[in-house]
Amino acid sequence: MAFRMVISTDNWRPDWWGIEKCFQRIRDLGEKHVELTTATGYNLLEGLGFSPYISVDDDPYIIRDLLRKYGLELASIDCDYPIWSHHSIDVLNKTIVFGDMIGCRLYITTDSGNYPPGRSDEEWFRIIQYHFECVLPVAERHDAVIAIEPHGYLTTKPDALWRLVTQNRSQRIGINFDTGNSFIAGQDPVAFLEQVKDRIVHMHIKDVSETLARALRGEETGIASSEVALGGGVNAENIQRCLDIMAATGRDIPISPEAGGDRLMRPSIEWLRRCLQARGHRLA
């Protein structure tokens, strides 16, 4: 079993970096595996080179060529659009087809903190189940796995997340476990992960600052990234215990450190590497 370090371009969203600058920085940090964030349509900031997002309506070979230029490999694509929305069908299907052309097999999605009013939880479960039924044929054709991230009203509840990933009866739906989102939502990340570990295929590793935890824990369902370098917040011990649990499963798991901005990236990566080494976990 081994962990694999994956660096998300979304970490540089606070810095307003374009995709090529992110790729260059990932290479300079000595890393190789990349997680992209995608959207549909076109965005002015992306066109001007100030956004780390890419459009799935653009030519995927542009990204393929940039990855080759910097000696990087694509590990996953974050294509979040709330899975309660019918738009999530189009977003996932387009991204899976786009990603297959540049060798991606893993796609991350989630829900949101607030759902439209007027429906019961049971109705939302059935709606989301239908949305995935519309996506799974595309996932089958393109050999894709979809990972649901705890980041919203249903997904940050362990029982609800388990139902969401199992109700379609497909092994192509798994979990991208997020240590920071589960914590800020008021859950115990370690207990949460223990309950869902058998379906985890990818992890986002976030710490949480003490100030943010005091202000928002139990009030929000997720955070964009850690406001402190990994290891410098109140979630550091939980992160280490979560890594121990996943190491014991014997499976290969991509892990993506998420911290807000370039100044936090090197210390976050270094802390995560030291943590794995000290606990005897192998990093591929």
Image (tube, helix red, strand yellow):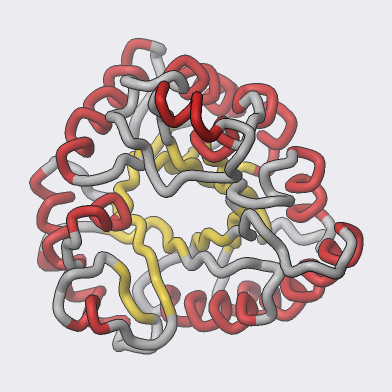
Establish if 230 lies above or below 264. Answer: above
Q: In this view, does 278 lie to the left or right of 266?
A: right
Residue beneath the point at 47% across and 15% down: 237
Q: Quadrant of residue 144?
A: bottom right
- Give coordinates of residue 152: x percent, y percent: 64, 51
Q: In the image, residue 216 lies at what x, y percent?
A: 53, 34
Q: How many marks?
A: 0
Residue displayed at 61% across by 67% down:
82
Residue 232: image x %, image y %? 32, 20
On screen, residue 173 versus residue 130, left or right, reads: left
Quarter of the image with the C terminus is top left
Residue closest to the eye, 92 or 52: 52
Image-based side of 183 in relation to 3, left or right: right
Q: Residue lying farthest front?
A: 215
273 and 208: which is toward the camera: 208
Give the residue at x 23% y 77%: 45
Question: Is 3 in front, or is 23?
Answer: 23
Residue 155 position, x and y percent, is: 69, 49
